[in-house]
């Protein structure tokens, strides 16, 4: 067990929190621009049910790109890896998460991986159901099962704000539709995707999801295999290679744990076989990652030898 007490964890949060003033909240999505850039929270969830936390732990935030790992796990369960990876690649990219460049320049116009926006849109397109509502409910039920919290829902204000400003994501969708990667109405897909990104929870919930991935897809409380072991392994591999946008290589070297970030400031970590981590710090660096959250993970990894490399 890392950190002998919440006080020890609190001291690390205070050290990392000094970095919040350097970053900037994601105001290109108007609703996210309302966040307090000084907030920082962390929760560490162990397989035995113990949970340590520190900071602004009561604050809720939307998953944003953290949801990409969860939707990928769901679609791999529903469709299988052959179906999914015929349409989305497995390679990291050095480009920004919302870039269209590789779609235009690659011989096969399919997204390089499921952690960039183009790949995530293709994955969300694969969620089964007859309507946006039924597909979203399927994803939400999956999250309820992993968190054991059936009150989790999405933030309507953030979803609406994203839907109204998602012009670049629409462009990605039209490009994917032109190249037969998706075949549904674009506005319908954008409705589903913005709701997915706007699913709201706190750091404790996020750490609970992280521990399911850390334990190879097994719910540590019930012992149920929520995610097949091989799918959990695939998801954790993507978290290592692509989870921190175009800073994933540096993150792997400095911190070395599977993690996925979102532009709301959330970071989900899954330390294999040990515990899940949920972080919220809305002040972002230039790559769109929580600047204090990254520092906090760096301190945790260094102090407790968490790197898997």
Image (tube, rainbow, N blue to C red):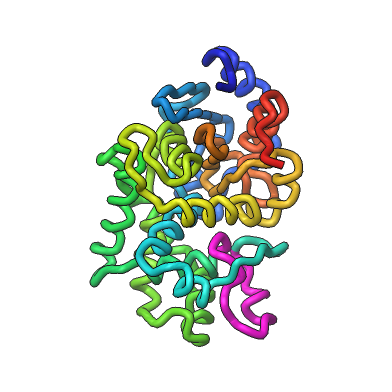
User: Residue shown at 73%/51% (left/top)?
Assistant: 249
Residue 2 location in percent, x, y? Answer: 59, 22
Residue 186 location in percent, x, y? Answer: 40, 76
Task: State the residue in front, 90 or 230.
Answer: 230
Q: Is residue 212 left or right of residue 221?
A: right
Task: State the residue in front, 234 or 247.
Answer: 234
Looking at the picture, does residue 283 appear above or below residue 105? above
**Observer able to see residue 30:** no
**Observer able to see residue 135:** yes
Q: Quadrant of the C terminus?
A: top right
User: Residue shown at 54%/49% (left/top)?
Assistant: 262
Stretch in magenta: 98-116
User: Residue shown at 61%/35% (left/top)?
Assistant: 293
Q: Is residue 236 left or right of residue 302?
A: left
Looking at the picture, does residue 79 appear above or below residue 271? below
Q: Main secondary structure of the magenta part?
A: loop
Q: Is residue 279 left or right of residue 227?
A: right
Residue 71's image quarter?
bottom left
Residue 22 location in percent, x, y? Answer: 70, 36
């Amino acid at each position: 067990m890392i950190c002998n007490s919440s006080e020890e964890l609190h001291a690390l949060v205070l050290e990392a929190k000094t970095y919040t003033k350097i970053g900037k909240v994601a105001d290109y999505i108007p609703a996210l621009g309302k966040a307090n850039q000084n907030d920082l929270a962390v929760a560490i969830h162990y397989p035995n049910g113990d949970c340590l936390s520190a900071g602004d732990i009561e604050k809720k935030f939307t998953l944003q790109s953290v949801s990409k790992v969860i939707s990928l796990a769901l679609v791999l369960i529903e469709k299988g890896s052959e179906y999914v990876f015929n349409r989305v690649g497995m390679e990291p990219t050095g480009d920004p998460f919302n870039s269209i460049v590789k779609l235009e320049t690659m011989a096969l116009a399919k997204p390089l991986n499921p952690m960039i926006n183009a790949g995530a849109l293709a994955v969300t397109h694969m969620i089964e159901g007859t309507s946006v509502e039924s597909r979203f409910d399927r994803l939400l039920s999956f999250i309820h099962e992993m968190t054991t919290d059936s009150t989790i829902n999405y933030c309507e204000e953030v979803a609406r704000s994203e839907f109204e400003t998602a012009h670049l994501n629409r462009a990605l969708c039209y490009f994917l539709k032109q190249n037969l990667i998706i075949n549904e109405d674009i506005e319908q897909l954008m409705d589903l995707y913005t709701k997915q990104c706007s699913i709201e929870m706190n750091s404790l919930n996020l750490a609970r999801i992280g521990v399911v991935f850390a334990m190879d897809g097994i719910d540590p409380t019930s012992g149920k295999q929520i995610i097949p072991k091989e799918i959990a392994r695939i998801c954790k591999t993507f978290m290592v290679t692509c989870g921190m946008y175009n800073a994933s290589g540096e993150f792997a070297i400095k911190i070395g744990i599977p993690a996925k970030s979102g532009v709301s400031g959330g970071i989900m970590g899954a330390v294999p076989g040990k515990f899940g981590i949920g972080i919220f710090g809305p002040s972002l660096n230039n790559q769109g990652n929580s600047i204090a959250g990254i520092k906090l993970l760096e301190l945790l990894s260094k102090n407790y030898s968490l790197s898997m490399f």
